[in-house]
Image (cartoon, helix red, strand yellow):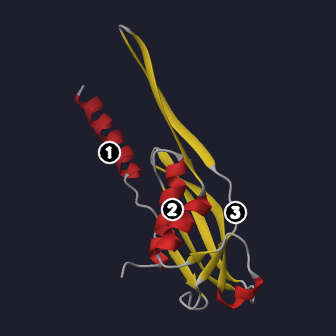
Amino acid sequence: MNAIKKWLFVICTILLMNGCASLRTPVIVRNAPIEMYRYVYISPTKELTSSTGGTYGGQYGIYGSSTTKSVNPSDVIAGILIKEGYIILPEFKSELTNETLIVNYGESGRRNRGLGYTIEVIIQFISAETHEMICSCTAEGQGATEADDIRQAISRALSSLFPEK
């Protein structure tokens, strides 16, 4: 009986350690200063809806609950950039190209982490005038749903690009 307890303890410890693995540090690639731009055009993205739930049984019946969350990556990016003082253009304006950044979003991978997984995103900032990459930021997030993962990854990526003042 004592040996079973030891093995159970070892297995629980290993699972706990895997679940505590930290998220990778965000990666920022800067090719030019981003501060010289005022306007941003964000490429449209589609809304993602995800849910999580469970059922519970007892002597009086079966019960369940679920949570559904949605996220539109371009909305999250816009909110953070507005907070940083950028002006979001609803459509591309050719007369403002020398002061405009084009922002692209993409999911760049998944990684198993403990009992769940992370989603990695990359956000790319391109000069509207020269079409050269000004900078990019990559980060991963993990939450209760995929929508939480994406929201957290975008926030981590952009907070690394714009550290608190």
Q: State the image coordinates of residue 84 (x, y, percent, origin top left).
A: 47, 77
Helix, strand or loop at label 1? It is helix
Give how far apart the Cα atoms at labels 3 and 1 are.
Answer: 44 Å
Instruction: State yes or no: discs 3 and 2 in contact (Cβ < 8 Å).
Output: no
- Residue name at image x 46 percent, y 79 percent: 162
Image quarter where the N terminus lies is top left
The quarter of the displayed image where residue 12 is located? top left
Q: Which label number is shown at residue 153?
A: 2
Give the residue at x 73% y 76%: 92
Depth check, front residue: 33 or 136: 33
Q: Position of residue 8 (x, y in %)?
A: 32, 34
In the picture of the structure, the residue carrying the numbered disc 1 is 13
Q: Position of residue 155 (x, y in %)?
A: 48, 65
Q: Position of residue 18 (x, y in %)?
A: 41, 51
Q: Residue at x 61, y 89 (%)?
A: 31
Three-letter code, disc 2: Ala
Residue 94 shown left or right of residue 26 in the figure: right
- Residue type, label 3: Pro
Q: Outermost residue, top direction? A: 60
Does label 2 or label 1 sit earlier along the sequence?
A: 1
The residues tagged by marks 2 and 1 sit, at their Cα atoms, a distance apart of 27 Å
Q: Nearer the viewer, mark 3 or mark 2?
A: 3
